[in-house]
Amino acid sequence: MPPRKAKGKAGGKPIKPPKRPAPQSSSSDEDDGEMTLIKGMIQRLEALERAKALPSDMGAGPSGKGGRTRTRGAARTQLIDSLSVRLKAMEERLSGPSDVPVVVLDEAAIPGALQQEESSAAVEMSAVAQPVGQVSGTGARGYAGPGGHAGSPMEAWRVAAWQAIDASLAPSTRVSYRAKVGAFSMFRRQEGLVEAWPVPVEHVMQFLVSLFRAGKAVSTMGGYVSALAFEAQVQGVQDTTGDPRVKRMLEGWARQQPRGPDKRRPLTLDVVAALIRHLPVCCSSPWEATLMKAASLVYFFGAFRPSEVLPRGRHSPVGRCLQFGDLSFEGRGVTLLLRSSKTDQKGKGQVIRLHAASDPGMCPVMALWQYVAGGPKASGCLFVHERGDPLTQYQLWAVLRKAMACAGVSDLGFSLHSFRIGAATTASGLGLEARDVQRIGWWKSDAFLRYVR
């Protein structure tokens, strides 16, 4: 019997096509709406993170073992929920103090001061192991542009407020505080303590004990306490570092470890003169010798601190150093405007006047005249190399150490701060009264006595 033909070919009923799956309940318009919502939330989150300088984790994927395959709709829903929770936490974090006395932060909501200086914190607390599972940086698919909310009045005033609070500290103090708060955060994670603000007093006490066992000086531990106190003020929560127990702990350790004598040696007038004579053979060119001589004499006769004249290194900020526009010649003297200093954090300014010396080879005014006449300068740092880049503390001290070797002077115990110590020692040795010595280094108390050797 021949095989039977299909009904469709024999003129019977046509074969029905298989049923297609039912369309998804969410239309393309709804998908676009969800993606727009997600993008907007990401942009809001990144703006909040920029306001607190928190690293973004938008490029980070889920951790742990992978589960079952999820649909795109479910993934978007979970992403929206996750972003909503984090946004709520960060907005509450930026909005100031809340009614809840203790705020527990998860890894993603750690304050910016704890996250920004993670590497510096590791240096400060080398005894604490580097924690794992850090929040990763922004991925290649992160949205760099600010969202529409960034221009809203609420977000604008928050950003401005945080910038003002951040600017209340000197740059070096701000970096130091961030490193110390980061070290405290690492310690709490290492010890399994809750990341809670206000900080429980017991956490502060336990942290100080660990610093003491690590051999930290009492003054160093006081710096950590100051950093935690400032962080509490920034967050608008109670400052628990003022607890009497914390104060008594530091006082007890101070009694056990009295401050030893200051072993730094002064660069007195005769030592400076010996170094100046050997600069020409220690420098690569006459310009460099003139530069080093002018900087050294300004350090000595102005009794400057190292950071007030030169930047520390090539990548250090230069705004707080002496600028070319701060120099002016007036008759037989010279005037320098010190815009800010260790004792003038608000930048009121201090006018320093240097007078001509009887010895032309040791005259700071003559040295500055020769230096300025060597090449035109209009702005930037006062002391720069011939090619225009600023002279740094490291470079000056390297040349002075060579000059010490040529002069047969041991560099043990000397540093750039020895110029300030030497100025006070020399002035006191010449028989000047206390108020005159104070005027030389603009000391406002008897603190200058610690500099006299």
Image: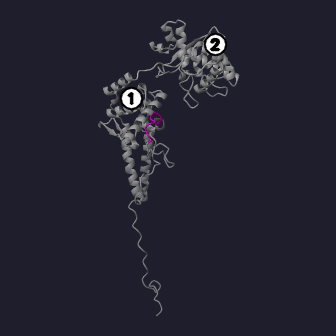
Is residue 354 visible to us here? Answer: yes
- How far across and down, in percent of the image, does residue 256 sit? 38, 23
Residue linked to disc 1: 225
Note whether 220 is above or below 443 in the view shown: below
- In front: 151, or 371? 371
Question: Would you say 147 lies left or right of 337 here?
Answer: left
**Residue 158, percent across and down?**
41, 35
- What's the mark number on residue 362? 2
Task: Describe the element under mark 1 as helix, strand or loop.
Answer: helix
Image: 84 above or below 126? below
Q: Is 123 inside the magenta-drawn segment?
A: yes
Which image quarter: residue 45?
top left
Please, is residue 177 above or below residue 137 in the view? above
Q: Residue at x 56, y 17 (%)?
A: 419
Magenta-tinted stretch: 122-130
- Give the crowd class for mark 1: few <14, some 14-19, many >=20 residues within 10 Å: many
- Seen in the image, is 173 located left or right of residue 380? left
Instruction: In this rendered view, identify the residue nearer to me: 135 or 43.
Output: 135
